[in-house]
Image: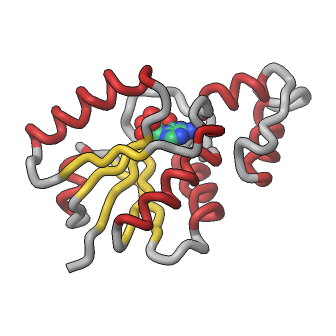
Amino acid sequence: MKRRAIYPGSFDPITNGHLDVVDRAIRLFDEVIVAVAVNIGKEPLFTVKERREMLRRSVGHMPNVSVDSFDNLLVDYARQKGAVAVVRGLRAVSDFEFEFQMALMNRSLEPRVETVFLMPKDSYAYLSSRMIKEIVRLGGSAKGFVPPFVEVALQRRLGKGGRR
Ligand code: ADP
């Protein structure tokens, strides 16, 4: 049986840190579904459709990686997809508390779905979508931190002369 994993997140927008995690995950699992979580109470910059499209452009060429979105409970979604694991990225210690809580809560809801944490390349250890948006909003460049077409989309939306 194929071992499938879900990599859930906001991906608002996708960064090279996320892509690093996908690269590592696909070496461990037969299939990885990168899934945009719709209802997580955050005000996103990009719509779900835009985020899914950006993910498709970034990982669409990777064999056995697909893109999806979900608006129900993560463990229910994982069960529907027949996934054996949820993949999450762990950057600094600051990620740990929240991720630990979520992993244990998800395990108590669905013991058959394991959470697997992957550490990114060290140069991405402090990279987050939130910080990237802040940099661009303040007039900086996200070059080297996100795929080039994401940098263009960010500058359009947030950069000097952008809409917001
Ligand atoms: P969420 O809003 O669920 O935290 P994100 O889109 O920010 O979603 O991230 C999705 C997952 O990817 C999370 O597990 C997060 O820790 C991880 N992640 C985000 N940025 C990086 C990075 N630079 N390196 C490794 N993992 C990362």
**Which quadrant would the C terminus be assigned to in this image?**
top right
Could you say which is closer to the camera, residue 1 or residue 45?
1
List x then y, in percent, for residue 26. 44, 66
Q: Which color scheme does this rendered protein use?
A: secondary structure
Report whether 111 appears left or right of 28.
Answer: left
Relative to 6, say whether 8 is above or below.
above
Residue 37 in view in this figure = no
User: Residue 155: where, in percent of width, then height?
Assistant: 82, 37
Relative horizontal placement of residue 133, taking residue 52 as reference (left or right)? right
Q: Is residue 125 left or right of residue 119?
A: right
Give the quarter of the figure containing the N terminus.
bottom left
Q: Is residue 68 above or below residue 116?
A: below
Residue 65 picture location, percent across and down: 47, 69
Q: Quadrant of residue 108?
A: top left
Q: Position of residue 137 (x, y in %)?
A: 77, 24
Give the residue displayed 86% in from the left and 24% down from the top: 139
Relative depth, front residue between 20 and 72? 20
Nearer-the-camera pick, 106 or 115: 115
128 relative position to 144: left or right: left
Image quarter of residue 136: top right
Q: Is residue 59 above or below residue 6?
A: below
- Residue at the location (43% across, 36% down)? 90
Q: Residue at x 14, y 41 (%)?
A: 107
